[in-house]
Image (cartoon, grey):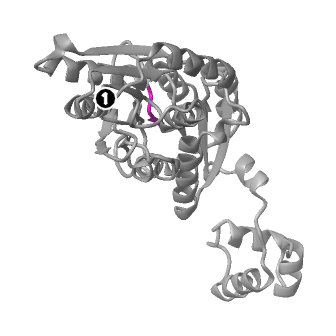
Amino acid sequence: MATIKEIAELAGVSTTTVSNVIHGKTKKVSPANIERIEKLIDEMGYVQKMGLRVLNNDSSQLIAVVVNSHKEYDDAILADPFYGKILGFIEERIRSLGYYMMFYSASDIDDIFKMVMAWNVDGVIALTFAKKDCQKIHSMIHKPVISIDAYGEIDGEQQVLNIGLDDINGGYLMTQYLLKCGYENIFVCATRDHGVDHLRWIGAQKAMQEEEEKEKKKLQFVALGKSRYSRENHYQQMARQIPFKKKTAVFFLSDLFALEAISFFADQGIEIPKQIGVAGYDDIMFARLAVPRLTTIHQDIRRKADLAVDELLKCIKGQNAERIGDYKLPVTLVARQSV
């Protein structure tokens, strides 16, 4: 890799002139020198030092992608297929538009506040935050902020655009489908009745309320443990308490939990869907690889990622006023063999 000094020597100009061409400050540089310097940059493979760019320029071309990780993971947050996939799509889209992604995850929200304040980023994409915390980031850095799957209520007008799903409809579609399949006992399982899981639970309740023979059927919310160890304990309790027969189904509000349960039930000799139906939410890649293949609610993760990046870049470039409120992407039911 060439240095600015080496390029300047070969071009017969000062290092200041080379630096000006690199940074687009060419008003006082002759066309011949610009052409000669740009040709040498291409031929010699000069790479600009990003650290100095971030510190010295008004635009760093850095996008901070932050995750407020509430769950406990065996390895890291990227072990969850949903986060691995959406972060991959976000990085790909950011890079295609000439920007760079800085990823930071912490369970302590104050650590995230400190990070976004410390770096000269052009904007922030926040995943799985409370809406009030997204607005706090916006007010702290005075830069564009887009949230994905934000939750909770706020006082006053929402200042940050949130890219989410029609989660109430997702819970409704799956529960309605399970009822149509003849299930009379439906257990809805998540780590907690909060955030997007709460909306999915509301949708499930709505479907049950519309059921004509609802007095003969049962819908129940089951809280799974946050850590892997406690979740396995919950699966064991489920194996003891849930009636394993054709009229019982378990609707997990995450494919990852559903796939863990299928594996656990298989080890216990429980046949799916012969003895119990299992459904999930998200339609991650492994849902199509499970045995049996998982019935689930599909969301377009790439569209969610691309929309978040595109809206953020529009705000950064001043192409339009910042959109606010909630943008809900549609979801669809994918019927497979686990039900």
Q: Which residue is painted at 61% across and 25% down in the image?
A: 71
Residue 149 magenta-highlighted: yes
* Main SS of residues in magenta: strand
Q: Which residue is painted at 52% across and 49% down in the image?
A: 286
Q: Going by the image, does 183 lie left or right of 84? A: left
Residue 30 magenta-highlighted: no
Looking at the rendering, the stretch of residues picked out in magenta corresponds to: 146-150
Q: Nearer the viewer, residue 46 or 215?
A: 215
Query: x, y (%) of residue 297?
Result: 35, 40
Using the rendered view, name the quadrant where residue 189 is placed: top left
Q: Is residue 34 above or below residue 101?
A: below
The residue most toward the left is: 212
Q: Going by the image, does 131 lie left or right of 28? A: left
Q: Nearer the viewer, residue 160 or 253?
A: 253
- Crowding around mark 1 (Cα neighbors within 10 Å: few <14, some 14 to 19, many 20+) is many
Total marks placed: 1
Q: Which residue is painted at 84% across and 79% down in the image?
A: 8
Secondary element at image label 1: helix
Q: Which residue is painted at 38% across and 12% down in the image?
A: 155
Query: x, y (%) of residue 151?
Result: 43, 23
Query: x, y (%) of residue 319?
Result: 37, 52
Q: Nearer the viewer, residue 94 or 268?
A: 268
Res. 32 in view: yes
Residue corresponding to mark 1: 171
Q: Name the amino acid type tagged 1.
A: Gly
Tell me the quadrant of the picture where the C terminus can be found.
top left
Q: Going by the image, does 104 lie left or right of 10? A: left
